[in-house]
Image: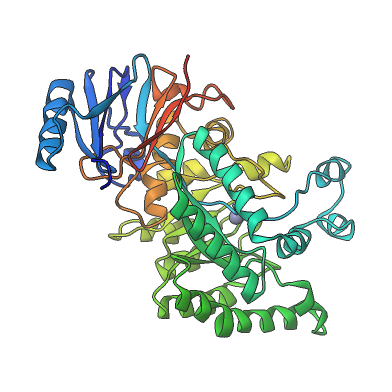
Amino acid sequence: MSAAPRGILVTGAAEVATLAGGLRRGGAQDDPAIAPLGTAVACLGGLIVAVAAEPEARDALAAALAAIGASPDAYDVVDATGGTVTPGLVDPHTHLLFGGTREAEVPLRQRGASYLEILAAGGGILSTVASTRAASDQELLAHGRRWLNEMLRHGATTVEAKSGYGLDTATELRLLAIAGRLAAEGPVDVIPTFLGAHAVPSEVRAAHPDIAAATEAYVSTVIAEQLPAVAAQGVAWSVDVFCETGVFSPDQARRILRAARDLGLEVRLHADEMAPSGAAELAAELGALSADHLGSPSPAGIAALAAASGRARPVVAVLLPTVPWFLGQDLREPARELVEAGVPVAIGTDFNPGTSPVPNLPLAMSVAVLRLGLTPTEVLVAATVNAAAALGLADRGSLEPGRRADIVVWDVPTHAQLPYWAGADLARVVIAGGKQILVRTR
Ligand SMILES: [Zn+2]
């Protein structure tokens, strides 16, 4: 017989930012939906049962416990005194699973080495592919657990994880299966995305006369071999393509993502990170869940995303501002322009070994405030309810009855201080899927 579940009551917060009311865009992105002072959050069985004045929340929790035959006082109290309570953060874009590290590229870049010079020195994405193929399942699992734990300590309770460092069918499937295993282990929920079209693997490049022919051949393999295997095994929720000048063209991305749709998978894009290629337009055309990076979308691309934002399910712009920051580039995603055009904006870390080894979503929120001109509230919306929408998840990202019990108590009196203490460890308590995970005493 398993023990009856215990409830949790989070009380005493200086501020409860509920983010209630779903995805936000335009001026509404600056609304945190702060609950009245004295609001408590009650949870049971992995779900939120009440967000209400403390006496009401206690009554609702006692009633919910009684309804399952448990004692009405079978709950733990989480003391949030002086703190801010928000939904658990959602990181909508990471490359969680990889072998090896690439710190050697940092001094090369400081000396002005180009991308091609870094490749010639044995760096770049294909070096990560070689290390990942060579890593055992146990090594990749241990790596995944370590960095998910780090993300959790910074308040992330849901983390998207792309494949894309295998680039052959067996390794791509292995990465997605490991992401699924990490999701099953918890406490962080891991959402796997298939990114076979991340780069052209070196063995395919070597077998063709030029990069154009090799890219075409690899696109055919992704469509004919990798996608059907991913769909048959049910190991990914969505499919991503690195659509960028010199990588995969919008035409190639369209073919891959249409094939993914035909197999019942959702689609998203690495879009216009470095130069406008038509990827933002393609995301709008396909009704993708998200268009990610958007360092250099064309005006037509922004207009297309804006036009799509009126749909029942808009395309979410997922900005990854730690990438140009880590690379020492001046490039800044047009965050204000996107917000003002009515496009819902989310923020992710793009955690990866080459361009953003950043397992700290609040730090990405700080960079978004400092470099992109978003407000503290806009970045909180971007890392909760809008990030959940970018993953197609309606069951999290806000504190409302019926949502997953993913909750963070932060050691600051207002959410406006989350991006302000840049890089700090601010999470006091993290509740993930109804389990109280991290308790940091002050
Ligand atoms: Zn990425």
Q: Does 215 appear above or below 239?
A: below
Task: Tell how many labels.
Answer: 0
Q: Is residue 292 visible?
A: yes
In the image, 267: left or right of 38? right
Instruction: Reply above or below: 42 against 242.
Output: above
Q: Is residue 311 left or right of residue 241?
A: left
Location of residue 17 in the rendering, given as x and y in whole percent from the top left corner: 32, 29
Q: Is residue 244 above or below residue 442?
A: below
Position in image of residue 258 (x %, y %): 46, 78
Which residue occupies 78% across, 77% down?
203
Residue at 82% in and 47% down: 105
Q: Position of residue 37 (x, y in %)?
A: 23, 18
Residue 16 rendering spot, x and y as whole percentages = 30, 26
* Residue closer to the observer: 12 or 20: 12
Q: Residue furthest front?
A: 1
Please name the colour scheme applied to the rendered image: rainbow
The residue drawn where x is 59% and y is 77% is 252
In front of the other: 286 or 44? 44
Where residue 194 sits, quadrant-wise, is bottom right
Please state the quadrant of the image where ligand 1 appears. bottom right
Taking the image as drawn, is residue 35 in sight? no
Please indicate whether residue 13 sits to the left or right of residue 97 in the image: left
Q: Nearer the viewer, residue 21 or 207?
A: 207
